[in-house]
Amino acid sequence: MCPSFRIEPERFVDISLPLGERTPCYPGDTRFSREILRSDGFVSSRLVLSSHSGTHLDPPAHLAGGSLTTDGLGPSRLVLPAFVLDARGDASLGPGLLDGLDLRGRAVLFRTGTPGGLHADMPGMETETARRLVAGGALLAGTDAISIDAPGSVACHRILLPAGVPILENLVLDGVEAGDCLLLCFPLPLENGDGAPVRAFLQPGPCLD
């Protein structure tokens, strides 16, 4: 049975990173660029970007052999109750952050305080944390960092994605308080997408009727 949410748009907090020339780009990926086109009194733009530009979602198909693509994710995986966990100052995203949480059917979002690119001291997720998210029935994992893994690692991607747990990266969680919320995240419906930029919102506070 699907949960019933109290939707209050006036309380939404936009947690999406604007796409522009200064948008952080994962090393080796395609940097966002935009060319303004004008014709017959109208303005249009030519965009060059990666499917993982800005705030974006990694579906299982981000790994070779993964079958679930961004356009295959149903609404129940994109609008769901969530926890925001404050991990600022932590050296890593350890499993202790999940203690006492009922993960079933929820998204878990980590506020690390290290957005803006790949940093040597960026707190990546520990593999045991990823395993606990999967075992606990979490439906999505997210972070304000450019990657949920530590620099040089993809270990947690290789645990979460094959288990069907999508990953949200490059969220804007400045000023967002830790605790319960409702997550709404809408990736571009790229056909057979290995990832897609996302417009994401949080509604703070308990959201289940």
Image (cartoon, helix red, strand yellow):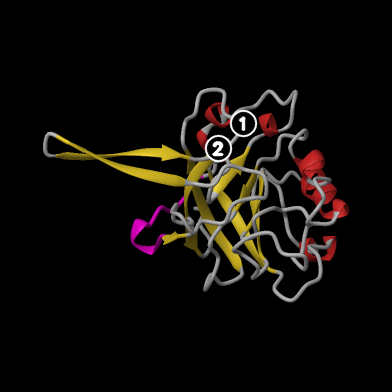
| Spatial CA span between label 1 and label 2 | 7 Å
Residue 144 position by quadrant? bottom right
Specify whether residue 97 is in view. Answer: yes
> Please, what is the three-letter code of the amino acid marked with disc 1?
Asp
Give the residue number, with chain letter if any, for mark 1. Answer: 194
Q: Nearer the viewer, residue 78 or 28?
A: 28
Please tell me whether residue 149 is drawn above or below residue 206 in the rendered image. Answer: above
Range of residues picked out in magenta = 4-12
Look at the image and tell me in which quarter the N terminus lies.
top right
Please tell me whether residue 53 is drawn above or below residue 115 in the rendered image. Answer: above
- The location of residue 121, given as percent across then percent down, is 77, 68
Q: Nearer the viewer, residue 137 or 153?
A: 153
Secondary structure category for the residue under label 1: loop
Q: Residues within 10 Å of mark 2 (few under 14, many from 20)?
A: many
Say if the magenta span includes residue 94. Answer: no
Q: Nearer the viewer, residue 32 or 177?
A: 32
User: Which mark is first along the chain, 2 or 1?
Assistant: 2
Q: Are marks 1 and 2 in contact (CB under 8 Å)?
A: yes
- The location of residue 50, given as percent across then percent down, is 55, 39
What secondary structure do most residues of the magenta stretch adopt? Answer: loop
In this image, 147 relative to 125: left or right? left
In this image, 35 relative to 75: left or right? left
- The location of residue 205, given as percent across then percent down, is 51, 65
> Please, what is the three-letter code of the amino acid marked with disc 2?
Ser
Q: Residue at 60%, 28% (x, y): give it.
A: 69
Q: Which mark is residue 51?
A: 2
